[in-house]
Amino acid sequence: MLRQKSRIGATNSATNNPCAAYGYVYGLDGLRLLVVLIVVIRHFEIVPVLPGGFGVSIFFFISGFLISRLLLAEEKRFHRALALKPFYIRRFIRLLPPLFLMGIVCVPVLYVLYPAQFSPVQIILSFAYLGNIVKFGAMAWGWNEGYPAIEPLWSLAVEEHFYLLLPAVLLLFRSRRSRVVAMVVAMIAPLILRVWVYAAMPLPLADQFNYHFTVTRLDSIAAGVLLTLLLDYGWLRLPAKAVWGHVLVWGGAALMLASMVHWSQAYEIAWKYSFQSLAIGVFFVGAIFMPNYGWLRRTLETRVISHLGKISYEMYLWHFPLLAILLAVLPSRGWAIGLALIGTVVVSDIAYRLTTKRLRGLRKRFGGHPAS
């Protein structure tokens, strides 16, 4: 039953709860593709003003939403007992093989092409899910920053820390109310910490700390978890009138655009991520759950878009190393960017087939779930 695809955009008649089936979430693969495209376009400087960090915030929100769905499904499946071992094994099977494949292929090539940038500290920390402290360490303690092409792995560290923390939170807080309160606190506490860091720490250290560290970025992830909890517990009722779908989607889009404006230094360093979490949540509810936006979900679920969304993790891993390699061997930056765009799709698809797709059966042995 858990493996059966269900259209989450429609409300479950038995429970009036759009999350009740815990099935495949229609539209999310396509949304993942859009998000990774934001990051790639920014890193390739195709549209330099595009804030790639905003794409990362959306990734965090989606991760919080999906992983909490998985854990709640596990809890219901095993009668309020979280099966942590299978959960962690599935996460490692999904995340580690593509990551290590990229590292095995790209790091030696980067070392040959850019020997002066080689940093053992960066390599070790990045592939041990501690890459989010490298940039800060370079500024605060004089570490060698290493390869810019590896730097995006910092966001994987934040997500991995979340995977470790959330099950403990759900085990510690068993009642519905306490879990919701815990997530609200997890959204407010990072904001308070960022404001304090901005006031107490000199620039640009404060900016690097607030942008990269897990404790200051958990609010985006917690917002996704909170949405799952509110839907699962029936505390968030979706409005029936179609006009509210337009309000949520277009209002959320307007809020997301507003969140990208550089309102002030304090906003940029301390307040922005909280505003983005709110904006993403509003848009997400409208686009993914409101019935009158089924056309959008169907568009995001077309065969090509859905497949590219499924390999978005691999695209995130490979795009920057491929660009760095091509920039070193090609005389034209334009050619390097063009080939890197094509190469990102091709290489990511190959990597997906070699790792994720090949290991799908192993994941199912540990309770693989369509929402993942």
Image (tube, helix red, strand yellow):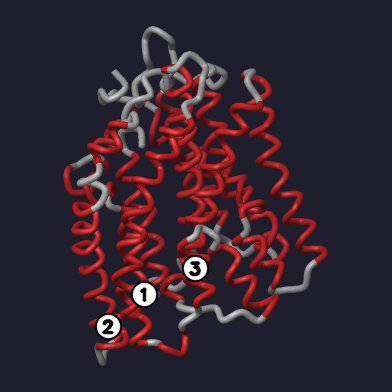
Pick whichever of labels 2 and 3 is earlier in the sequence: 3
Q: Residue 294: x, y in percent?
A: 30, 31
Of discs 1 and 2, which sits in the foreground?
1
Please tell me how crowded label 1 is: few (under 14), some (14-19), or many (20+) other residues with Cα within 10 Å.
some
Residue 210 in the image: above or below residue 45: above
What's the amino acid at mark 2?
Gly
Q: CA distance from mark 1 to mark 2?
A: 23 Å
Relative side of 226 to 322, left or right: right
Residue 91 in the image: above or below residue 6: below
Instruction: State the residue lying farthest toward the right.
Output: 200
Q: Is disc 1 placed on a helix, strand or loop?
A: helix
Residue under label 2? 334
Residue under label 3? 124
Pick the quarter of the image with the N terminus. Answer: top left
Question: Marks 1 and 2: CB-CB under 8 Å?
Answer: no
Q: CA distance from mark 3 to mark 1?
A: 11 Å
Please tell me how crowded label 3 is: few (under 14), some (14-19), or many (20+) other residues with Cα within 10 Å.
few
What's the amino acid at mark 1?
Val
- Number of numbered discs: 3
Residue at image point 32% right, 73% down? 106
Q: In front: 260, or 312?
A: 312
Pick whichever of labels 1 and 2 is earlier in the sequence: 1
Q: Residue 72: x, y in percent?
A: 48, 24
Residue under label 1? 107
Relative side of 27 to 155, left or right: left
Quadrant of the image occupied by residue 292: top left
Pick whichever of labels 3 and 1 is earlier in the sequence: 1
Please tell me how crowded label 2 is: few (under 14), some (14-19), or many (20+) other residues with Cα within 10 Å.
few
Quadrant of the image occupied by residue 334: bottom left
